[in-house]
Structure formats: C-alpha cells, structure tokens
Amino acid sequence: MFSLSPPKCGPAPGLDTHQNAVPALTCATGIAPYLQRLCRTRSATLSDIADFGGETTLRTAIMKVRGLKADHDETDARRILRQAKADVHLSLASLDLSCEWDWEAVTLSFSDFADAAVQAALRLACFRADEKGWIEWADKDQIVPGLFILALGKLGAKELNYSSDIDIVSMYDGELFPTGKMTAGEAAQRIIQHMSQILEQPSEHGYVLRVDHRLRPDPRSTPVAVSTASAELYYESVGQNWERMAYIKARNCAGDFQAAEAFLTELEPFVWRRHLDFWALEDIRAIKQQIHATGGHQGLSDPEFDVKLGRGGIREIEFFAQTQQLIHGGRNPALRNIRTIDALTALAAEGHITQETADDLIGAYGLLRGVEHRIQMLNDEHTHSLTDREEQRTRVAQLCGYDALPPFDEDISELRKGVHAHYSDLFQATTPLSGVEGNLVFTGVDIDPETVKTLQGLGFSEPERIIADVQGWHRGTIRATRTARGRQLLTALEPRLFQLMADTGNPDAAYSGLKTFLHGLSAGIQTLSLLTVNPVILSDLINIFSMAPRLSRDLAGRPELLESLLDGGFVEDLSEDTCGHFSAIADVGLSGGYDFEDAMNEVRRNFRDAHFRIRFKLLNEPDVAETADRCFADLADSCIQALTPVALREAEKKLGDAPGRWVICGLGKLGSRSLTAASDLDLMVVFSPDDKAQGATQFFTRATQRLITALSAQTEEGLLYEADMQLRPSGRAGPVAVRLSAFQEYYANEAWTWEHMALTRLRVIAGDRSLAAEVTAAKEALLSTVRPPAQLKADARDMRDRLIKERPPRHDLDIKLTKGGMIDVEFLVQILQLTNPTVNWGTRTVSEVLRIAVEEKLYSEEDADTLSKAYHTYCTIQAYQRAALDQMLPAAEWPAALQRITAKSLKLNDFSAVIDAIEQHQLRVWDMFCRKLQ
C-alpha cells in the first residue's frame, strides 16, 4: 500500500547544515536541486527552521507579505515577495517531507501565502495607477472599490500545490470603480497586467507566482479584467458546463470582497441548477475525454504517469466529486463545497456515494497530492509527471521515503487502479435519459391547444412540456413503451393518471415523480399492467410521487418493489412489536450458509422490501407515524443482528477463532429505537478478551471493520446504512472496538458530560448475550454515579450555547436545532437522567423517561406533558421530512400532499395549524429549558 514517509538519503555535498537541522529537509537537498538551492540562498531561514520550527518561519514569511503597504517601494516590495515565497517553500518542505504536516495543512498554508501575495501585488498596482491618474483612489488604507480577484482551481479550493499556477479571474464593477483619466475597463486592465507582472517577472530572487487568467469569460476575446456586467451576461447566455465546474471552487482572494460576494451570489443560479440535467453530464464526459487526451492513455501499470491528468490521477478524483456536485448541488446546498475532500465527504453523508468510496478517494487524493508536491520540489517546475526516466522517478520515490524504485512504481500503480475503478463506475452508471425533450401529449406531433387548456385547468404549470414528453413516450423513447402492448397500457392509464395527479394538489411534483418512475423502468408491460388493474395502488403511488422525490427515485430504480404492495402482509397494520416482520433478515446471519458478499446482498434485498413498506405506509396512512420510528429501529436491529455473525466469521477466516466476546451497541436514535427513514446508525463495539488471549484488539478491530463494510458498502443490491462510530470513547481518535475495561475506565474518569448524556441511550443490539448483560450493567453503574447537578446543567447550557452560535436553524422547519426544538427536549431528558442517578431509567424513549419522571415526582404532569407533546410533534415532522424529501425544506416548500398527511397524522386541520403548534411548542420548551437548567 502506498504511503509517504521522510526521505532517508544524505544531504547535498558541501551543504553547511545547522546542528539542529530538520533531517528530512537536509536529506532532500541531496535529491532535489531546488531545495538544495533554497538551503544555500536562504541559509538564515534554514537556521531559523532548525531553531524555531517550520511553522514559525512560515508564519513570519506570510506576515511580512501581509504587512506590505500600498505605498511601499515597489522594487523593495518585489524583493520581499520573492524572498518570502522562498522562505514559505523552504518551511513547507520541512513540514511536508518530515510528515509533520499533512497535505491539507501544506496546501492551505501555501494558499494563504498566495492570497496575501495577490492582495499585496494588487495594492501596489493600484497605488501606481492612482499616481498616474488612471484612477482616483481616495483612501489608500482601504481597497479600491469594485475591483476584485476571484480564485478558482486549486487556489480557490485553498489546495494550492507546491509549484502551481494560480487560476484567477479579475473583475470590476463599473458602477463602483473609481475612474480617473481612463475608463474603468482600461484602468482595470492596466492594474491587473501590472499586478501579474509583480508576481510573475523573474529576478535574481526568483518569482512569486505564475498567474493564469484563462478561466475568465471568453479568454480569447476579452481583456484580463472583465466587468461584472459583461461576465453575468456571458454566463447567462453562453456559459458552459465546464465553467460551472470551475466556479464550484470560486472564492474571492483579493480586492473588494463585498463586490465579489455580490457577483458570486448573482452567479449561483448558473452554477447550481435546481433541476438535474442529464444531458449536461454528456458534456462533462466529453471534458473527461479531453483530459485523457491531454494526460495520455498509458496503462495503469505504466510507470510513466501524469499525477494530475492521467488515468487514476488527481483530476479523476476531482471530476468524480464535481460531476456529482453539479448534478445534485442545485437542490442540496450541503454539496456546494469548494474543497474536493469536503465534497466527497458531503456526497457520502448525503448518500450519493458510499462512505467506503469517499474514504478510498480521500486517502488516494492526499497521497497523490503528496507525490505531486515532491515532483515539483525537484526543480520548482509546474509539472505533475512521473517520467519514463528511472532517474527522475527514483528521486521522487526517495522524497516519498522509498528505498527503491520498484516498490514505489508498484504502489503507485495499485493506487491508480483503485481511483480509476471508482471513476469508471461513476461514468458507467450515469447514462442520459433517452428522448427527454420537454413534455407530454396523447397522440400526434403537434401541440393540441385543447389539451393545453385541459392540463392548465388541472393545475399543471407547463402543459406544453408535459405534452411533448408523452409524445416521446408514445414514440417508444423510453423502455417501458417500446412494445405495442406497453403503449396501449399507457394510453389506457393516461386519463386516470392526470386526474390523480391533479387531485394531489401538487400536480407538477406528481408529474415529476411519475416521469422519473417511468423513465427508470427497464420494461413496462408488467408494471403498467399491475397499475391498470389495481386502482388503489395507482392512487397511492401518485400520492407518493407528489410528495416524496426520494421514494420516487427508489421505485424508478427498483420497480419490483411495487410487487410487495400486492403481498397480503403489506396491508397489515404496523404493530408496536415489529421484530416478527424482519426475522427473515436476522436469519441470514444465523444460517451460516452465506458467504460475506451473499449475506450482504440477501440482507439488502429483504431490507429494501421492508424499508419500502414502512415508508410507503407512513406516507399514505396518517396513523403509521406513531410506530414508524420503532419499525425503522427494529429493521436496523435485524440488519445488525444478521451481519454481526457474518462479520465475525470473516475475521475468523483471516485471524483464527475469536479470542473473546463482542457486542454491538446502538446509541442516539438507534439506541432509543426512534429512527427515521434516512437515519444513519450511531454504533459502538465493545469486546472482552478471553483470559491470556493474544491479539484481541487486532481481531475485534478487523471484525468491526468488516461489520461496517457489511452495513455501509454499496453492492448491486444497494446500500443499507451509513454507520457513524464517533460516539465511541475518544471519538475518531479512539479504537473502533473498545475493550470493556477501557469502556468502564473512560466513562468513569475521562468522558465529558455530553458523552454521559449520549450514554443514556446506549442499547446492546447484537453479539454475545453474557457480554451484553455485562455492558448493560456497566452502563447502568456508570450512570448511577452521583455527579454535581449544577455542573451537569452548566455543561448542558454551554453546549447548547455553542450549538446556537455554530449551528443556527436554517429555516422554520429545522425543528432539531431551533430554540425549544428537539435537541432541547433531549437535553432536558438526558440531564434529568444524569441528575437523578438512583432511578432505574434503563434505555427508553423520551416519552417513557418522562412517564417515569412523573411517577418518581421529578416532573409535574404538566411539564412532562409539555415535553412529550412537543417531542411527538417534532418527531412526526422529522419522520415525514426524512421519508419524503431529499433535504430539509422550509414549510413553504413542502409539497401539498406531504403537508396534508402530516397535519392528519398530528390530528390538526391543516398545515398552518401544524406551524402554529410548532411555534407554541418551541416557546414552551425553551421556557422550560431555561427554567430546568438554571
């Protein structure tokens, strides 16, 4: 497996190194001529690095640049900039090569330097323009109004590599720019040209940065400084998809930040389109082919490799993320990340890719960026290539910490194969939808004016588009209607379909869901026949389409789920005890007849049917909201119970018999059995080794990793859950599997108050029964410890204050984070349990805890009722949000059908009454929160 470590060879001959010199840096001077030159010319900095550390010298260099004033002597300023750049390079090399800093810290710091350098150069250029009378700059201590520099590419993402060009777009707002003897356009162009010269022009001290202006609008025919008005017109009229991708990473790095933010806000609709555009993906694929033409088509085992543009390289990872950001980011702001690794993390969090895929690509991205840095450290050249010359690759391998070239070449090849596999899978899966051109009609090729009127009367806002769609369906442009029988069935269904869509109160949304569904069908006769002879199912389905885009997509990809609607058991009520419905899933782990992959797929098949059944009934039957959370939790329990023995057997294949016992615990909503349709699983693994057992930690770590893979990996049968283990002792810094004694020690002596609060919801789900009893007893013992109530309450208040500042509610239905919302109820209940440790609380739901509190006379019936009713309302809102919507939406954007089912479930007249009830609950809960936690 590829890894980076400090170089081990000797320093350059004759280099006068400081006695405390950083070994990795001095060793590198024998490999990299550029670093050797820096060490000789910047010997004082080298000594400072040895005495004070690279971080200190880096900070000093950047501060020098930030301290440059607009009226500083330009010749001296150029010297300061170039020497600062050399010191930054030397400092970062020491931190990077020694592996003291990771690539993220290195690229962030070099980006900070570049920002400072561009800002300084811009100020110097503006001062000269003012001296010449080109502009009238009244206040030299302030920025020139209306003039700004946008950073794109690596600089925009604050991921600037060691010897990179900076991609910038220079703009001015003509209404703000202070003109003098020249027009705004002329003056701005002179200023930007001068700024670029300050940064690029080489001298005896080198250069500062290479500047690339080619990402500006129409670079072949426009000046280097572009007016915001012309840029907005360009992107609105002829902007292309590759430019949308470029602006994903756009941010202001110098100049008038307020004007820049105004421009980027205006550009958001261009970059982030709310509606998915599958034809745009074809254009993006063409860009991919251009990149391969540039990077070459070398085999993945060929040692000659462009780390940036080649197959399995950096750009493939970036395109993997950016493509999906373009498709999904318009509807989901959580995906609008400028940094590649943040985008991958968000894509996994939102369920667009698996966590395993994200982790693979994030890890590979960091390693490839490290190799890229070391290539550029050789000669400070803007290159990304491992050449066919063994001498060059050997130098890079040595800078990466390798002793020999063959292992380096092999490890790079394996790394590339992993990246390219993920990249290839993405583009194989994203094929365009055939014949999607607008809308629908019944017959013919012309738009029938009467049909337009009819559809308008039914409430459709774009009847012409709908008519054209249906025309395409009747021409067989979708697979469902490529047979005569399929087209006949569609014709028979059409009148009923349109009436049902109109009846939902949101016909446009219902049509969108129907269209997604029909286009996803691989064949149409069986499904269309089913809908023709089952009008109740058809009605329920259209209702779902009008309010649940998430479920519509699932049905499009898995139309066989409709068959489960015909199952006699489907119409049964969801009872309080739902374990019996999912016993088939749990049996997978007990049979022992499945291998790892088969078990994963079998569980997923059963899970898919059960999960769909719960969601479908939740969205069509108001009373189901009372028990859906328990059903989702029971389903998750069954999956965990099924896959736990499977994961254990996988570990035993590798490491021999289990050297002890283990259990899998749920926390959070899983622990309290109150999951939603889209909840991830908060898990903790606890083990107890046998006496004198060896390697127990390694074994149960392996078993835990296999379990997480079994739960979270994307297979041909889909995804189960995203698993989150951050609530384990020490969080991400702690082991994934926790020894029972360490569990007890940590919570007894080290855990924070919030961790004890989380512990109140810990519940053992699977594993060894005897250890389950021990863990439960240990939990109860830990929670029975008397703690100062005042301190617990103070800690809870502090946590809530931080949440209010750091994570304010996004809209009126962000019922989790708003003051008086779900978190406040949970905080009150958990602090109640911690401050009354002698009560046998167990692991219970919020309503159950409050019932006990009344029995124990810890809460009045009125207070308990206030919290119970509020929490029930919040959970109902969240249940429908998670089951139906791709993201949390404000009340005004909820589909009408979803509003109706929610109001019915809460036994209120309409959705406005729901909003009123929420507001009243929030006021009462917040008042109680402030009273109870004083």
Image (cartoon, rainbow, N blue to C red):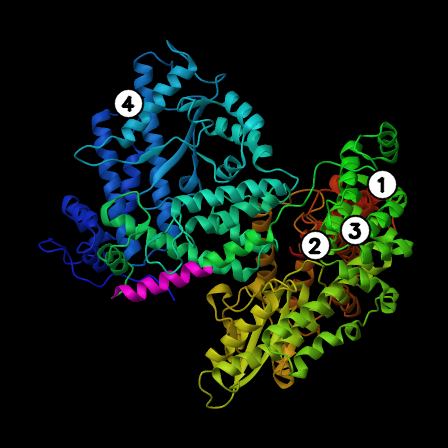
Q: Earlier in the sequence, mark 1 or mark 3?
A: 3
**Three-letter code for the amino acid on which mark 2 is drawn:** Met
Residue 630 included in the magenta stretch of the image: no
**Residue designated by label 3:** 483
Q: Can residue 931 be seen at all in this image of the molecule?
A: yes
Q: Amino acid at mark 4?
A: Asp
The residue that appears at 33% across and 40% down in the rendered structure is 113
Mark 2, residue position: 822
Name the residue type under label 1: Gly
Identified by mark 3, the residue type is: Thr
Question: Label 1, label 3: how many angstroms apart (C-alpha)?
Answer: 33 Å
Eye-nearest disc, 1 or 3: 3
Between discs 2 and 3, the one toward the N terminus: 3
Q: CA gap, disc 2 to disc 4?
A: 56 Å
Numbered marks: total? 4
Under circle 1, the secondary element is: loop
In this view, the mark in front (2 or 3)? 3
